[in-house]
C-alpha cells in the first residue's frame, strides 16, 4: 500500500490541476483555418465551446510520440479568457490520425494553466469536439497531393476521352471493313 502512495498522490494532484484549470480557464473563441478559408466560433455563454477542446492542451501527462506533420490538418487558434486578459493557444489538428500538435514553448501558460506543448493523441470525445469544430472546412494538405480541380477540367477531360474513343471506334471499323472486303482482281 505504501508503494502505491506516490502513484495515488500523483493521480490526485493531476485531477486537481485539471479541475482547477477548468474553473480558471474558459474558451472565449476558436478560429479554425482549413485549405482555403477560416471560421470562428465565439462562446456566448460558459460551456458553448466544450472543455474537450481545451483539455488536451493543458492536461499533464498526455504527451505522445512525435508524429509526421505532413498530413492533412487544420490550424486552430483557441482564445482563452484569463484573469488579466485574453491569451491564445495555437495548435494543429490532424483528423486522419486523431493527433493534436500543441504549438508553443514548454512551460507556457494559458490563463494560469500550464500548456501541454507537443503531440497529444486525442480521446474519442476530444476528437469528436474537434471534428464538430471543423465541419464544413476542407483540411490543409502541405503535401499538395489533394487539390481542388477547376470546374471546367472534368468536362473537358471527359469530352477529350469521348473524342479519342470515337476516333478509335472509326479506325477499328474501317480496318474490319478492309479485312472483309475482297481486293478487286
Image (spheres, helix red, strand yellow):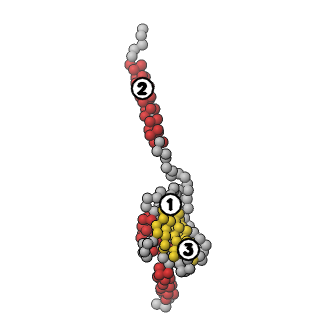
> Residue 38: which disc?
1
Q: Is residue 81 above or below residue 135?
A: below
Q: Nearer the viewer, residue 1 or 115?
A: 115
Number of residue marks: 3
- In three-dimensional space, the C-alpha distance between marks 1 and 3, rounded to whole angstroms, equals 19 Å
Q: Callout 1: few (<14), some (14-19), or many (20+) C-alpha neighbours within 10 Å?
A: some
First-in-chain label (2 vs 1): 1
Q: Nearer the viewer, residue 174 or 31?
A: 31
Q: Position of residue 117 (x, y in %)?
A: 56, 72
* Residue at 55 percent of width and 68 percent of height: 90
Which residue in the rendered view is the most extreme toward the top? Answer: 185
Q: Secondary structure at mark 1?
A: strand
Residue holding disc 3: 87
Task: Find the residue positioned furthest to the left.
Answer: 180
Q: Which one is earlier in the sequence, the residue at label 2 or at label 3?
A: 3
Q: Nearer the viewer, residue 175 or 145?
A: 145
Q: Is residue 178 above or below residue 52?
A: above
**Callout 2: helix, strand or loop?**
helix
Question: Which dot marks residue 147?
Answer: none
Q: Position of residue 47 (x, y in %)?
A: 42, 75
Tell us which disc is closer to us: 2 or 1: 1
- Numbered tag placed on residue 170 in the rendering: 2
Q: Residues within 10 Å of mark 2 (few under 14, many from 20)?
A: few
Horizontally, residue 128 falls left or right of residue 89, namely left
Say whether disc 1 or disc 3 marks the residue closer to the N-terminus: 1
Seen in the picture, residue 34 relative to 164 is either above or below; the reply is below
Residue 122 seen by the camera: no
- Tell me if I can see residue 105 in this picture: yes
The residue that appears at 60% across and 77% down in the rendered structure is 107
Residue at horizontal 56 percent and vertical 80 percent from the top: 84
Amino acid at each position: 500500500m505504501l508503494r502505491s502512495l506516490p502513484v495515488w498522490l500523483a493521480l490526485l494532484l493531476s485531477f486537481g490541476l485539471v479541475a482547477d484549470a477548468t474553473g480558471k480557464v474558459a474558451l472565449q473563441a476558436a478560429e479554425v483555418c482549413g485549405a482555403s478559408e477560416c471560421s470562428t466560433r465565439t462562446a456566448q455563454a460558459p460551456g458553448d465551446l466544450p472543455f474537450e477542446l481545451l483539455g488536451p492542451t493543458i492536461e499533464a501527462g498526455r504527451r505522445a510520440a512525435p508524429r509526421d506533420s505532413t498530413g492533412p490538418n487544420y490550424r486552430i487558434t483557441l482564445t482563452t479568457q484569463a484573469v488579466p486578459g485574453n491569451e491564445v493557444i495555437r495548435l494543429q489538428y490532424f483528423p486522419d490520425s486523431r493527433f493534436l500538435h500543441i504549438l508553443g514553448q514548454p512551460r507556457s501558460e494559458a490563463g494560469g494553466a500550464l500548456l501541454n506543448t507537443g503531440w497529444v493523441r486525442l480521446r474519442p470525445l476530444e476528437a469528436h469536439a474537434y471534428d464538430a469544430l471543423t465541419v464544413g472546412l476542407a483540411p490543409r494538405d502541405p503535401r499538395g497531393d489533394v487539390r481542388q480541380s477547376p470546374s471546367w477540367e472534368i468536362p473537358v477531360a471527359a469530352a477529350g476521352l469521348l473524342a479519342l474513343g470515337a476516333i478509335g471506334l472509326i479506325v477499328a471499323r474501317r480496318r474490319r471493313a478492309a479485312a472483309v472486303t475482297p481486293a478487286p482482281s
